[in-house]
Image (tube, coloured by chain):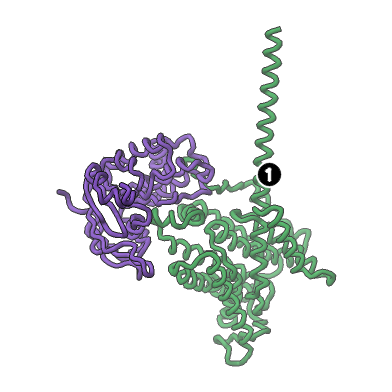
Amino acid sequence: MSEPVVETQELAVRFGGVLAVDHVNFVLRERELRCLIGPNGAGKSTFFKSLTGQIRGANASGRVLIRGQDTSGWSTHQIVRLGIGIKTQVPSVMNGLTVAENLWLSARRTAGHDGADAVVEEILSELELSAIARRLVGELAHGQRQLVEIGTVLANKPWLVLLDEPAAGLTNVETERLIAIIRRINQTATLIVVDHDMHFVRTLDSLITVFHQGAILLEGHAEKVLTDPSVREVYLGNRA
Amino acid sequence: MTGAAFGIGRIHWQWLAALAVLLAALPLVSETNTPILLAVWALFALSLALMWGFAGILSFGHAAYFGLGAYTYAIASVNIGESTVPVLLALLVPALVAAIIGAMMFYGRISDVYLGVMTLVVTLILNRFMNATAGDAYKIGNARLGGFNGIPAFPTLNVPGDPKMEIYGTAYYYVVIACLFIAYLVARWILSSAFGRTLIGIRENEIRMELLGYNVPAYKTAIFSVCGAMAGLSGCLFANWAEIVTPSVFSLGTTAEVLIWVIVGGLGTLIGPMIAAVALGSLKLELGHQTLVDNSLVLGAILILVVLLIPRGFAPSFTLWRQRLAQAQVHRRQARGTRRRRIALQDVKQ
């Protein structure tokens, strides 16, 4: 079994009286594709944000280790510079800039001023965005904006990709395309995908971590997890 | 580049050269006193236009750096007795103060309206402090700060290394114009560099830029400091023009005026705020000759009208109007072509 690339030890996040992440111990290995699922308010996105330094300081405790380095207390940009690409829950793109400019800003940091253009070309063609390269992102449809954000994540050439609800608001066709893209990314990178769309998660066919009330309820493969009574109860209540 | 131009058009060197020739010839037909002041204001407007329009940092207290530049020059020149080092200090001191204040704000995650209030408070503190320095105790070396009356007599600009060769009148006009052109080109160079493009990205979405691995507070502190230096230079040039420095350089009026110039000229452009500074500055000077209407009232009315009627400001609206005109021409040409083809087709059929 390969070495863990992401590990949390007793990670906890508290907002006032609410324990949003409850002393989570989590391990992710090289080139793994892991889905984090759970109902709304389960703590998935908070856990995700605490991995990437978006929540730190007095609210957070415990340790986050990325490739063995303790990143607790690091700022987001320092963690990203370890080689991490992050897609947020609500598409976070630069609406006033074109698709190519969004990608260029991402590529420039790792490929440099001269190498950025080639990376932009590569991502545009990989995600089939060439036709809208010169359009302002703010003018695009939701699905296209999601794709642009994934493009900015990939243009950074990360070894670890974190996608928070990438399928939210996508049509079936767009979701199918996204699944193909995620599989392609996973050929070279490790992935964590946060989502609560069961069909999407089942199709990805990966190891799943189920969150409930800030803690890990269950871990296992899709078939086991999605048929587990406790998971069904968490999602559907006693009706299940 | 792959269509990644970041909305920064190319420099129209032919227009820049024509403007340079016009400005060079101006002393032949006009006095230079007013043009010097207008050029100083244009430089001041440029410094805020770069910071606010391209990095998205709205400072309500940009006058602080203008005033610091003016005071630093006056104090240093009284003590040193010539102008070369004081000019450099008038750039360095505001840059350093801006870097310290900027670092405190940006690393402290202060943004939006809080940032505006904090920068305003800094300016008001400087204004109050300088007004309270009338006593003999308030001296820096040989320079008395002079409270409300300010520092009235200090050596003005001289040829570097030769304090006896003073630069004034037409020669000073050329120095100010040269500073304005250089500052404009520096601003353009910054915007066309990777640093400038990163700033534009930060203006658009700070969180995304952080998620791409950019040290956002460091970038913001850097441009805040650069624009502080630019404002300091304009303050220094103003001090040399006025030959007196008073606490009014830190006033609310100074701070409000530069904001109005940038809004009226158009956020996201460099040339618009510079033109607005010259136009509104001229209007203010003209209104200053009469007592019927208060000039602040007129400036305020212009600001309200611009915000209501052309919220993008003059320069971006003008660019948009030109683009629409060009598009309309293309559509007309296409429609004419289609009509001709249809007529030709009908002729063939007949």
Q: Residue furthest left?
A: A1
Which of B87/B103 is in front? B103
Q: Which residue: 40% across, 34% down? A: A173
Q: Colour of chain B?
A: green
Q: Is residue A56 above or below residue A2?
A: below
Q: Judge from the rendering whether residue A140 lies leftward or rightward of residue B167; answer left or right.
A: left
Residue sitting at x 29%, y 54%: A211
Residue that label 1 marks: B321
Amino acid identity at mark 1: Trp
The answer to whether residue B84 shows anywhere in this view is no
Q: Residue at x 31, y 52 (%)?
A: A234
Q: Position of residue A138 (x, y in %)?
A: 52, 46
The chain containing the residue under callout 1 comes to B
Q: Tell me which corner region of the image, top left, top right, bottom left or bottom right, holds residue A221.
A: top left
What percent of the width, then of the height, locates residue B203?
51, 56
Q: Is residue B32 above or below residue A95?
A: below
Between A117 and B23, the one lying in front of the other is A117
Residue B102 visible in the current orientation? yes
Q: Residue furthest bottom?
A: B136
* Quadrant in which residue A179 is drawn: top left
- Mark 1 secondary-structure assignment: helix
Q: Give left or right: position of A42 versus B323.
A: left
Q: Chain coloured purple: which letter?
A: A
